[in-house]
């Protein structure tokens, strides 16, 4: 069996990597800095499939002249990882590249900790999921987390053009316009683009590649925009704005186009965000129903999975809207990031009883709300320098939030 083209063309040095200019630039690109200083710490690469996580890991090892081994958490066994660890102990410095680390259970991730602590090997973990959700905090804290971004159409076009020009493997002819079409269809996934080229090599040797041929091998091409590299992101934006604008028909149309594109995980993440960002306190129970629909889709897949997604998209579009909770938490988070870190009132601290005598004298003893009428008592909870700030500004045009604030006003009324 022939070696897949994606393997044959895999870059073996960082200088041949396509995309990821934010990591590879000569100014503050962290990968270039690692190479120039010849210092490598454990890393976590995360990003969409096909952006080059494993490729960069291997190229980095090659350029540093470090030995490395690869463990795929999706298919390899525990014994395979143990063998790599034993090899690493006798071959320092040694890199263990773990693909799909999100597939490793928490206990197995913890096994890596003791070896990282003593410097037995350097870890480069790769994942398509957010590492703050799928990697143990203790393990994550010992790694530098780097996001790999989707390869832009422009970056992919330049890279593929160079590969095709310098490689005698390619036995077909194609124009720049067709190559741009291929880049657009790949939607940031370099592996998809290479796979398209491989099919053209095998099935259409010595032919001039045209749009009809591309549509023949990728029927779904007509459902994607072949002109704009940001089309997929634009579709997600259009879906959210249609739901926010309460247009169920438009929302269903953009949902259908996103489902046809095949990038289902990005769609599911966006739907989960929309229900909390744009519907929020106007219909908070809807978040539970959306999560159920998302989980159902993941379980049954397509085509049946579009039914629960269609249901909740319609419900989100027709629901009352409120972004008051989103605005409130964003403002609070922004204040914290801007350094507004002030002392917590003593009577709110976990060890407030240690200062009990001093606080009683000052009249600042913690008041237990359940000891008062309506289980409420007025007291200061925010730090003194922020005591008058109002993060939450209710929107009273929707029934639920209006009722919520009426109840609040009633039980806090003196």
Image (cartoon, helix red, strand yellow):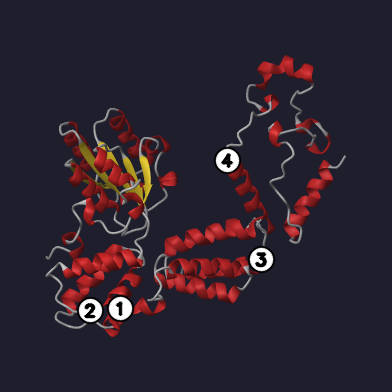
Observer-nearest of 310 and 146: 146
Q: Secondary structure at mark 2?
A: loop
List x then y, in percent, for residue 329: 62, 47
Mark 4, residue position: 338
Left/right of residue 413 with respect to residue 5 in the rendered view: right
Q: Quadrant of residue 195?
A: bottom left
Q: Position of residue 413 (x, y in %)?
A: 85, 42
Which labelled disc corresponds to residue 4?
A: none
**Mark 3 vs mark 2, CA separation in Å:** 49 Å
Within 10 Å of disc 1 (Cα), the crowding (few <14, some 14-19, many 20+) is few
Q: Counting residues from the N terminus, which is met first, the one under dot 2 or under dot 4? A: 2
Which sits in the foreground, 44 or 27?
A: 27
User: In this rendering, does residue 81 appear at all?
Assistant: yes
Residue to which mark 1 is pinned: 177
Distance Cα–Cα, label 1 vs label 2: 8 Å
Query: Is 395 drawn above or below residue 120 in the view shown?
Result: below
Mark 1 and mark 4: span between their CA atoms? 47 Å
Q: Residue at x 73, y 14 (%)?
A: 357
Q: Nearer the viewer, mark 4 or mark 3?
A: 4
Residue 299 visible to an observer of this rendering: no
The numbered disc on residue 174 is: 2
Kindly report which numbered mark, 1 or 3, lies closer to the viewer in this rendering: 1
> Which is nearer the N-term, disc 1 or disc 3?
1
Please provide percent x and percent y for residue 300. Answer: 43, 64
CA distance separating discs 2 and 4: 52 Å
Quarter of the figure that contains the N terminus = bottom left
Q: Earlier in the sequence, mark 4 or mark 3?
A: 3
User: Mark 1: which secondary structure?
Assistant: helix
Left or right of residue 18, residue 238 in this image: right
Q: Quadrant of residue 384?
A: top right
Badge number at residue 319? 3
């Amino acid at each position: 069996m022939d070696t897949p083209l994606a393997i044959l063309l895999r870059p073996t040095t960082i200088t041949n990597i396509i995309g990821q200019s934010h990591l590879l630039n000569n100014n503050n690109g962290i990968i270039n800095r690692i190479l120039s200083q010849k210092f490598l710490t454990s890393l976590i690469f995360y990003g969409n499939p096909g952006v080059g996580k494993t490729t960069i890991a291997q190229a980095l090892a090659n350029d540093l002249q470090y030995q490395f081994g690869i463990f795929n958490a999706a298919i390899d066994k525990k014994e395979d990882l143990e063998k790599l660890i034993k090899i690493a102990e006798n071959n320092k410095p040694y890199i263990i590249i773990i693909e799909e680390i999100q597939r490793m259970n928490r206990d197995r991730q913890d096994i890596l900790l003791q070896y990282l602590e003593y410097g037995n090997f350097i870890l480069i973990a790769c994942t398509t999921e957010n590492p703050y959700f799928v990697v143990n905090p203790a393990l994550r804290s010992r790694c530098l987390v780097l996001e790999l971004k989707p390869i832009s159409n422009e970056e992919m076009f330049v890279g593929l053009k160079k590969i095709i020009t310098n490689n005698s493997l390619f036995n077909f002819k194609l124009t720049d316009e067709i190559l741009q079409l291929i880049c657009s269809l790949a939607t940031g996934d370099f592996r998809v683009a290479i796979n398209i080229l491989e099919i053209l090599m095998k099935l259409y040797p010595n032919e001039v590649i045209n749009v009809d041929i591309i549509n023949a091998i990728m029927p779904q091409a007509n459902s994607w925009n072949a002109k704009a590299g940001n089309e997929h992101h634009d579709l997600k934006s259009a879906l959210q704005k249609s739901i926010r604008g309460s247009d169920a028909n438009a929302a269903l149309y953009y949902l259908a186009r996103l489902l046809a594109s095949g990038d289902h995980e990005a769609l599911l993440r966006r739907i989960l965000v929309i229900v909390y960002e744009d519907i929020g306190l106007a219909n908070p129970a809807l978040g539970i129903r959306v999560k159920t629909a998302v989980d159902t889709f993941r379980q049954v897949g397509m085509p049946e999975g579009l039914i629960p997604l269609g249901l909740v998209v319609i419900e989100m579009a027709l629901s009352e809207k409120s972004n008051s909770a989103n605005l409130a938490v964003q403002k609070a988070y922004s204040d914290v990031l801007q350094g507004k870190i002030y002392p917590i009132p003593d009577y709110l601290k976990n060890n407030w009883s240690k200062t009990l005598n001093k606080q009683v004298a000052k009249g600042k003893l913690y008041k237990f709300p359940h000891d008062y009428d309506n289980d409420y008592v007025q007291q200061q909870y925010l730090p003194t320098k922020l005591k008058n700030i109002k993060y939450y500004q209710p929107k009273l045009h929707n029934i639920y939030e209006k009722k919520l604030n009426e109840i609040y006003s009633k039980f806090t009324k003196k």
